[in-house]
Image (cartoon, grey):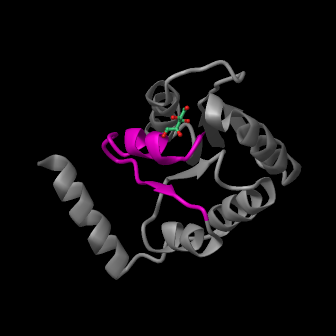
Amino acid sequence: MIAIGSDHGGFELKEHIKRHLAERGLEVKDYGTHSEESVDYPDCAAPVCKAVLSGEAERGILICGTGIGISIAANKFDGIRAALCSDVYSALMAKQHNDANILCLGGRVTGRELAFMIADTWLDAEFLGGRHAARIEKIHDIEKQ
Ligand code: RB5
């Protein structure tokens, strides 16, 4: 299952991504927000991060206006590697090299079709492990400090 969430700035893109992923046959759970009424992005990041950390969701997608605030908030969770991507190459690397378990997008930055390509690329990619795994371990070491 893929957990998805946004604030009001990412609401419209979230709805499009949700539909796109469902059309691909993927199971998606929407953790809100459910309208364009103003909300605070840390509150929107938390339930998606918790779903990923608990194993309820395999991966998460978070969207705010720029993707910046919601990625900063998500990365405060121990074990979350949230990658803000606005291009396809970064989306591929985010999984292959960084094993990002959350993809962040900017609803006011990235157009719908590009966002679909970014999400598809990240979802279809696999972590390469090896030297990259050792680097992720170093991130875990920092989290323990
Ligand atoms: C909300 O106006 C906006 O600040 C938020 O969506 C996000 O862009 C913050 O980083």
Which of these two is toward me, 7 or 124? 7
Could you tell me residue 107's position as x and y percent?
A: 66, 45
Could you tell me residue 54's position as x and y percent?
A: 45, 36
The picture quadrant where one finds residue 114 is bottom right
Residue sitting at x 64%, y 28%: 8
Which of these two is toward me, 22 or 72? 72
Could you tell me residue 68's position as x and y percent?
A: 47, 47
Which residue, as the protein is rendered here, is positioned at the far right?
Answer: 23
Residue sitting at x 42%, y 67%: 98
With respect to residue 142, does 43 lie above or below?
A: above
Q: Is residue 27 visible?
A: no
Could you tell me residue 126's position as x and y percent?
A: 57, 71
| 20 on left or right of 59 | right
* Residue 71 lies in the magenta stretch: yes
With respect to residue 42, does 86 lie above or below?
A: below
Which of these two is toward me, 31 or 107? 107
The quadrant in which the N terminus is found is top right
With respect to residue 4, does 98 lie above or below?
A: below
| 86 on left or right of 135 | right
Which of these two is toward me, 143 or 116? 116
Which residue, as the protein is rendered here, is positioned at the far bottom?
Answer: 131
| 35 on left or right of 3 | right
Q: Is residue 8 visible?
A: yes
Number of numbered tags placed on the structure image: 0
Residue sitting at x 78%, y 37%: 15
Which residue, as the protein is rendered here, is positioned at the far left?
Answer: 145
Task: Give the magenta-colored segment's residue range.
Answer: 63-86
* Residue 78 lies in the magenta stretch: yes
Residue sitting at x 65%, y 61%: 123
| 139 on left or right of 14 | left
